[in-house]
Amino acid sequence: MEIEKITFPVRQNETGSLTFLEAQRDVPFDIKRIYYIYDVASGARRGAHAHKALRQVYICIHGSCKVLLDNGKEREIVELNNPWEGLEFKGLIWREMFDFSPGAVLLVLASEYYDESDYIRDYQEFLSYLEGKV
Ligand code: TYD
């Protein structure tokens, strides 16, 4: 699967923990946008789309969630449950997020401003788009 796990720096002492990340250093692109998904209803699924060009890193900064990854050939489920760990998408990947723990917050770092035309929201269209790229 075309993903990479990124481990962010942690500064921890008896008073608590701090994690930081810097564009082009800890995350391999310039961050133009940050958004976060929270208050997810029990049992709900989010995502169900792919991005044509957008680069993203997912970080579950509180609680846990699972991400289903599908590159058209194989599927993989990754659990995110550490505020110091990022999941970077490195290819055209269909993703669905589910199994959010109560209070979970999924933070997303994105390389571009929001652009609906970069989304593929239909799975069959995703497969066709992949074929066109090969
Ligand atoms: P969507 O990307 O479909 O959310 P998810 O990945 O959780 O399924 O976005 C939900 C709605 O929010 C949709 O109407 C588009 C809008 N939106 C923005 O306006 N700006 C953004 O940066 C994002 C990520 C979404």
Image (spheres, rainbow, N blue to C red):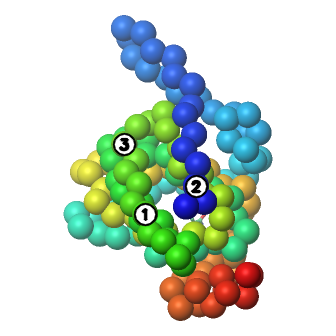
Tell me the SS state at disc 3.
loop
Q: Residues within 10 Å of mark 3 (few under 14, many from 20)?
A: many
Give the residue displayed 43% in from the left and 20% down from the top.
17
Between discs 1 and 3, the one toward the N terminus: 1
Tag 2–tag 1 contact (CB < 8 Å): yes
Kind of residue sitting beneath label 2? Ile
Residue that badge 3 annotates:
81
- Residue 102 x %, y %: 24, 51
Nearest the camera: 1 or 23? Answer: 1
Q: Is residue 43 above or below residue 56?
A: below
Q: Does the numbered disc 3 mark a residue whose Cβ is under 8 Å from ligand 1? A: no
The residues bearing labels 2 and 3 have C-alpha atoms spaced at a distance of 16 Å
Q: Earlier in the sequence, mark 2 or mark 3?
A: 2
Q: Is residue 102 above or below residue 75?
A: above
Of the 4 image quadrants, the one containing the N terminus is: bottom right
- Quadrant of residue 7 in the image? top right
